[in-house]
Image: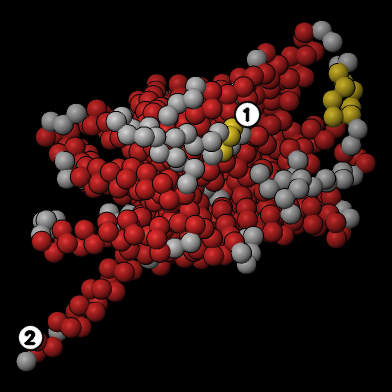
Amino acid sequence: MKTITLRNTLLLMAFLLFLALIPGLVSEFNLNLITGMAIYSLFVLSYNILFGNAGLLSFGHAAYFGMGAYTAIILFKKLKFGILAGLFSGAATGALLGLIFGLFVVRLGGTYFALLTLAFNQLVYAAAEKFRFLTGGEDGVAAMRPKLALPGMASIDMFSSVNWYYLVMVIVLAGGAFCWYFTRTPLGRLNECLRENEDRARFIGYNVYASKLAIYVISAFFAGLAGALAGAFQEFVTVTFINLDKAAEVLIMTFIGGARYFWGPILGACFLTWLNDLISSWTKHWPLIQGALFVALVMYAPNGLSGLVMSLRDRLWAKAATPRPAA
Amino acid sequence: MDWITTLAVQGLHGMVYGMLLFLVASGLTLIFGMMGVLNFAHGALYMLGAYFSFSILRWSGSFWASLLVAPLAVAAAGMAIERFFLRKVHAHGHAHELLITFGIAYIIEELVKMIWGNKPLLVVLPPALSGSAAFFGIQYPVYRLFILCVSLLVFILLFTLLFKTRIGIIVRAAVANKQMTDALGFNVPLIFLLLFGMGAWLAGLAGVIGGPYLITNPGMAATIIIDLFVVVVVGGLGSVEGALIASLLIGWLQSFGILFLPQFAIVFEFLLMALVLIFRPHGLLGEAK
């Protein structure tokens, strides 16, 4: 793993500065597109804690995303929650749901894990469709983004795309930083160890069940937060936040970006959001193109776009490096 | 209607759906047992059966022709999936195999929407299969009895093939131990291909006869795949007998669930799956691996 060098610190500062300057550089339409990319980046990062790090293939991550979205929007509407309170309640209910389902699913691995997460996702979807008094069923719920009221400051209007962009960026960067930091904590390390050899981890004396459960809940927490952000962003939540297509979307984004590198899924989320926007203006068969791209990558580039980028870099690097030993 | 007839009718309803489910699930569970890959595209193949049948019916005007041809076309599609996609990612491991079938299911669903549209399609049944029949004082739709007969017939054929013939022994041997069967000189990749074709044929057949009953629409793959997964988990991945028991259980849970507690019919199914996973994690008749 790379250490924190001066160069990396400077690169990070430049990147943050760039993000801070974006609202002055692009149109409002593109700013909203970038806000969407940021939200989905958080969603895929939460997913990759399971998929990339733990090697667990979940087909039901939309359950937590949708739970967060519904919680936030219903609290905004019915109980007049503030923006931060609503968003974090969404993350908390996502985590709570993750805890309840996690008790069952983390006992299993491989195909059974995939199946059970899928079944639980359908259960939540069915509930969202049935509990019309809360969720509005197919019609959905709508609520305006409330103002941001920080103690000791005047309340900030979230109706403006620029203000909303900054709030999303701060939350996503903080969440993303935590996800990155998590891979370096003992629990994050154990997570990768469980992927490689669960029996050995158990033999060394780790409580595998409790560790997996904790990891699952953390992943669900960030999925819930991303869902709450997405709900507040669209100011409208329907069952499309929680259905199988949404569960498939996060899997496809993560896979197309490449699960092996931390930044891979983010690349996938940004690339697909951008491509979706670009292609939607030409054709309505976007899912078909997305599916074909997915199949092509599964077959020919199992490490996704980030894997392609890295192998390209290695190849160029090797070309530059080979002449030297020959001389 | 008195209670006993109501129960009998609901029992019959559940059996019709259960047997239909078994037709699709039997192929899925055999493919899983043999290749270790859960075919996400299986529901999509079932849907293709229904749509192929719709188009063949429109061209030829004969339901019987579609009953014969559509499952064969689906079998061809299934074999193409195995030969040109699944086999190529085999070396990358099970997660990739699962993902590729998932991607293919996604593409088939979109193609179906593109070709046949988003609306449900109405299949006109031949006069011999419409209307209802009366027996023991019950009026029951002829078409549902037809579904029951076809699926029972296929079930008997499948069990005879699997448990009474030499081909069946080889298939079961390959399901139990792939390497050993290979070492004994059988062409295991060919067996895989043919088994995949047969599973697709069964799914296609279920689609043809299930289409008019469960309504041919682009969501039918996503609807059945959930039930299918519950069936294979409850029955035990790889077990045909388990799939039969679980299919009938699901069918009856749904038909009686709707009768007694209509709001919670879907919950029973997941409750059953959760209970099985807690007490018998490898399914009722599945073997721990």
Q: Residue at x 32, y 45 (%)?
A: A170
Q: Secondary structure at mark 2?
A: helix
User: Where, quadrant-wise, is the N terminus of chain A in this rendering?
Assistant: bottom left
> Front-most of B259 and A256?
A256
Residue B37: x and y, percent? Answer: 44, 49
Residue B270 visible to the viewer: no
Q: Is residue B240 above or below residue B78?
A: above
Which residue shows up at 48% across the image and 61% down it? A27
**Residue at x-position 61% and y-position 34%:** A140
Q: Is residue A72 above or below residue B91?
A: above
Q: How many other residues sit within 10 Å of disc 2, few (<14), some (14-19) or many (≥20)?
A: few
Residue A15 is situated, as x and y percent measured from the top left of the image, at 27, 60
Q: How many marks?
A: 2
Q: Are marks 1 and 2 on the same chain?
A: yes
Q: Tell me the number on the disc at residue A325.
A: 2
Q: State the residue in front, B264 or A226.
A: A226
| Chain ID, mark 2 | A
- Residue A189 lies, in percent from the top left, at 17, 43
In the picture of the structure, the residue carrying the numbered disc 1 is A136
Q: Amino acid at mark 1?
A: Gly
Expressed as whole percent of the image width and height from the top left, the position of residue B52 reads: 74, 55
Res. A125 image quadrant: top right
Discs 1, 2 touching: Cβ within 8 Å? no
Q: Amino acid at mark 2?
A: Pro
Mark with earlier residue (1, 2): 1
